Image: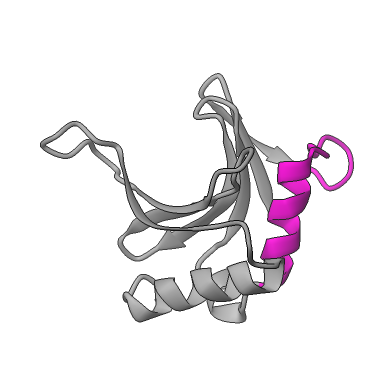
């Protein structure tokens, strides 16, 4: 399932009708196809968030939402834990891991799934 967030409004993206077809969206869909079943059970969704300016795969884990952000330019993939309320420092997200763009989609899916599983994020 894909969702789009724009101007604070969350919309479901329907298949080929209004789905973004940019490089980041295609990359997110490709990686999502290789995710193991344990990640799909956590409610993995592809998110196009224009408010926060990212495209990624969101996992609804037992400790809150975790997002794998697709890199822009020469940046790295980032695994972000989105906090429900800001912490004492005012942060709304915590970067848990990042890795370079040298991996293929299957490798990125594997790295993400193993990180979430080994840290107890998955149900």
Q: Is residue 50 above or below residue 14?
A: above
Q: Is residue 116 left or right of residue 32?
A: left
Q: Residue at x 24, y 36 (%)?
A: 91
Q: Is residue 103 above or below residue 23?
A: below
Residue 42 at x, y = what percent? 50, 68
**Is 17 in the magenta?**
yes
Q: Residue at x 10, y 37 (%)?
A: 88
Range of residues picked out in magenta: 14-34
Q: Is residue 99 left or right of residue 109?
A: left
How many numbered marks have been drawn onto this rendered protein structure? 0
**Is 16 in the magenta?**
yes
Residue 119 at x, y = what percent? 32, 75
Q: Residue at x 57, y 36 (%)?
A: 54
Q: Is residue 99 above or below residue 85?
A: below
Q: Residue at x 61, y 57 (%)?
A: 101
Residue 95 at x, y = what percent? 35, 50
The C terminus sits in image quarter:
bottom left
Residue 22, located in which quarter of the rendered image?
top right
Residue 116 at x, y = what percent? 41, 71
Residue 122, located in which quarter of the rendered image?
bottom left
- Which of the colour schemes (rainbow, by chain, secondary structure, one colour) is used? one colour
Along the line of sight, which residue is nearer the eye, 54 or 9? 54
Q: Residue furthest top?
A: 7
């Amino acid at each position: 399932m894909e969702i789009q967030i724009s101007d604070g409004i969350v919309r479901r993206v329907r298949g080929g009708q209004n789905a973004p077809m940019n490089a980041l969206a295609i990359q997110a869909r490709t990686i999502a196809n290789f995710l193991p079943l344990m990640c799909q059970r956590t409610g993995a969704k592809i998110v196009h968030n224009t408010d926060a300016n990212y495209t990624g795969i969101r996992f609804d884990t037992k400790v809150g939402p975790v997002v794998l952000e697709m890199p822009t330019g020469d940046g790295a993939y980032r695994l972000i834990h989105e906090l429900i309320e800001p912490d004492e420092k005012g942060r709304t997200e915590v970067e848990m891991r990042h890795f370079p763009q040298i991996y293929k989609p299957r490798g990125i899916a594997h790295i993400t799934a193993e990180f979430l599983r080994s840290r107890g994020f998955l149900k």
